[in-house]
Amino acid sequence: MTADDRLTTLDAAFVWFEHPGTPVHVGAVATFEAGPLVDDRGELRLDDLRERIAARLDALPRLRRLLAPVPYEVDRPRWVDDPHFDVARHVRELRLPAPGDDDALRRAAEQIQSAVLPRDRPLWDLHLVTGLDGDRIGLIERVHHALVDGVSGVDLATILLDLEPDTPAPPRRPWTPEPAPDGADLLVAGVRRQATAPVRAAVRALRDPMGTLRDVATVGRGLAAIVGDGLLAPRSSLNGPLRGSRRLAWVRADLDDIRAAGHRAGGSVNDVVLAAVAGGLRSLLLERGEVLPADLVLRVLVPVSLRRDDEHGALGNRVGAILAPLAVGIGDPDARLAAVVEAMRRRKQQPEADAVGRLLDSANALPPRAARILTRAVEYQPLVNLVVTNIPGPPVPLYAAGARMLEALPIVPLGANLTVGVAVLSYEGTLAVTLTADADACPDVDVLADGIERSLAGYAAGPGSPTR
């Protein structure tokens, strides 16, 4: 067993937090040209695709590994090789009944994304969807959040996909799973690690005392910035218990138009997206009959990747976060965008994301039972109203066995008391915004989607446009 086999506290938290009705996986829905993926009879070349994917798993060994809990929870779970790994259990065909339109694909994705990944195998799967109209093949992907964050999820896609349509399939090498440690081995290793943890932490601090002081200062400044705007998020109908299955809604925009809108406002694409989300939230809450004071500011958690360039392709979670204020009480869309740009400018001047990242790293020093108790407490968190994650995707087309990917739509999990989440992904000049909602707690997610779509269209048109 190596240190690489052991989950971090953040990775383990995504495992501990999951239970039936609350799946904790990230995902995507994509569509591809059908031609290269089907044979002369029009049938999906499923065996060829499985072989192609299996040949690439040497680069990502955790995709062939299972979770192994440590007895009595004396340590965090470990990854161990699946002795019965079979790519056919992870790459499957799903046939849609006619008419196989976008609504049918969305409904299939909602059903699949609502279910928890089975724990008796590595925590990922791909459903290749046939029966779609428009000569397309769909893909519904799930990967457990313990394996990937948003950025490493994109890395996973680029490893499994190709940058050129004529990329040959790599040869499949024999793979022999390492023998899994038994429960006694895991228990002994866990007890030993917990007993020596304080010594290791002290040694790390003594090796680089100035670095330790810098970390403490960074955390202090970052937390001061967060507390300075008020520690608690305002109460909102967006926060409540998760009770149902998942509903999805999608919005699309031209990336260049949104980039130009951000430039005009002195901000970024992400600023425009946040302002559009604020506009959509305003529409949703007004539709629900809620009173929106002019100074109402909702708080959104925006994950920030802390992954270094040399860490791309590595699985696991390497993230910090910014708590972004969204001025949903402002009715004028341009004033709302200006408020977001200014708020995010101030946020970026503070080490907020690094502070959160260092706090998450420091959680590795917690005993597993204490970390698990804290994880369950997050279910009642009062700090944020929703999560908005923006993942920069590839600007060039990707291919699967020669078939061009036509569209990619990201999906984030729901957790805690957050009844709706927003994921943004750019691909080949298109900005896709996906809303994941609890079907019972947020049945009106389409109102939110329509509001975001109108806001994005208005920002793309520019101030003074007659179409606004």
Image (tube, grey):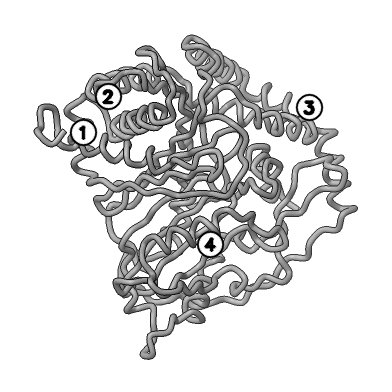
Given the current orientation, which residue lies at the most extreme top position? 228
Name the residue tied to disc 2: 337
Residue shown at 39% from the left, 23% from the top: 326
Q: Quadrant of residue 375?
A: top right
Label 3 or label 1, whichever comes before in sequence order: 3
Residue shown at 36% from the left, 66% from the top: 101
Q: Nearer the viewer, residue 175 or 397?
A: 397
**Mark 3 vs mark 1, CA separation in Å:** 53 Å
**Mark 4 vs mark 1, CA separation in Å:** 42 Å
Callout 1: SS: helix
Q: Quadrant of residue 396?
A: bottom left
Decide: is 171 above or below 125: below
**Mark 4 vs mark 3, CA separation in Å:** 34 Å
Label 4 or label 1, whichever comes before in sequence order: 4
Identify residue type, mark 3. Answer: Pro
Q: Nearer the viewer, residue 183 or 460?
A: 460
Q: For the residue carrying disc 4, how many other residues have a C-alpha within 10 Å: few (<14), some (14-19), or many (20+)?
A: few
Name the residue tied to disc 3: 198
